[in-house]
Image (tube, grey):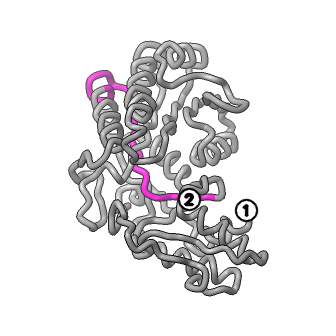
Amino acid sequence: MKAIIFGINGQDGFYLQSLLQQQGIEVIGISRHDDHIKADITSFEDVQSLVKEYQPAFIFHLAANSTTRHEVMFENHQTISTGTLNILEAVRLHSPHAKVFISGSGLQFFNNNQPIKETDPFEARDAYSVSRIQSVYAARYFRSRHGIKTYVGYFFNHDSPRRSERHVAQKIARAAKQISMGSNERLLIGDINTIKEWTFAGDVVEGIWCLVNQDKVFEANLGSGIGYSIANFLTECFSLIGKNWKDYVDVEKEFEAEYKQLVSDSSLIQSLGWKPKTSLKQLAQLMLEQA
């Protein structure tokens, strides 16, 4: 049995590859860089060739530039939206038995600072959300009109030691690690009261696997449903090194967060048997150990 992962270089691709290999599945990792198969998800010819050659049982579309900045609008449109269409049409033509997973985002929903449900309306609040919304409608079209088993997992904030430092969790973990080793550096943080989920990426990919291995639910939030503030994560990280974060952190007073709270209603995916196992403290410890 084979699985293709587009976006294998990201944290989700890394943990998903490990999970699939433990299941005895041959993983075909696709990337424009590094030592995986080099192919471009924005090229229909590339995608079609891969699907036709490998006849995968599963395809996972995890490729994206995970930023809402307008400047990467075209890159995200091509990777997320066009990439989704390329995968689904290639599957329709050459491997209609394959199950396809498309990653979505909690950011594409209308957010009134309450737990977000899969049935809540979409909101094109930024260029990134536009691409995500388009890909979901493409998934629904191929599922309803062409019978392709296409799943959408809506991701909420999730982290791991494989996060880049532009993400706040990794920024905090690496600073705490340096401070524990004697550094006097100061950490500049935006709104420390922003509430979001801090789920471990290794747990989230188990949620993906749970979703694609059943045929009743095709769209689900892959989140913990538990929100913590950035201040909570600062407390966990600095308590591990025996320090008070307030002695090392400057709050950027002019910073405006994209949202006050971004938390999922995770009852649907939990009804299928998945829930994350890693606590906030355990995530902080894991990130500090590998920072």
Q: Is the residue under label 2 in contact with that under label 1 (CB below 8 Å)? A: no
Task: Report x, y in % for residue 164.
Answer: 60, 53
Q: Where residue 138 sits: x, y (%)?
A: 31, 30
What residue appears at the point 78 percent right and 75 percent down from the top-left corner? 181
Q: Residue furthest front?
A: 254
* Magenta highlight range: 142-160
Image quadrant in which you'd find residue 288: bottom right
Q: Classify residue 63 as left or right of residue 283.
A: left
Q: Name the residue under label 2.
A: 159
Q: Could you tell me which residue is drawn at 34 percent across and 37 percent down?
A: 131
Element at badge 2?
strand
For label 1, the residue is: 290
In the image, residue 224 sits, relative to residue 162, either above or below, namely below
> Is 165 in front, or is 82?
165
Q: Confirm whether the magenta stretch covers residue 2.
A: no
Q: Where is residue 224 in the image (x, y as percent from the top left)?
A: 45, 64
**Residue in view at x 56 percent, y 60 percent:** 200
Give the mark nearest the N terminus, 1 or 2.
2
Q: Which residue is drawn at 53% across and 31% down?
A: 58
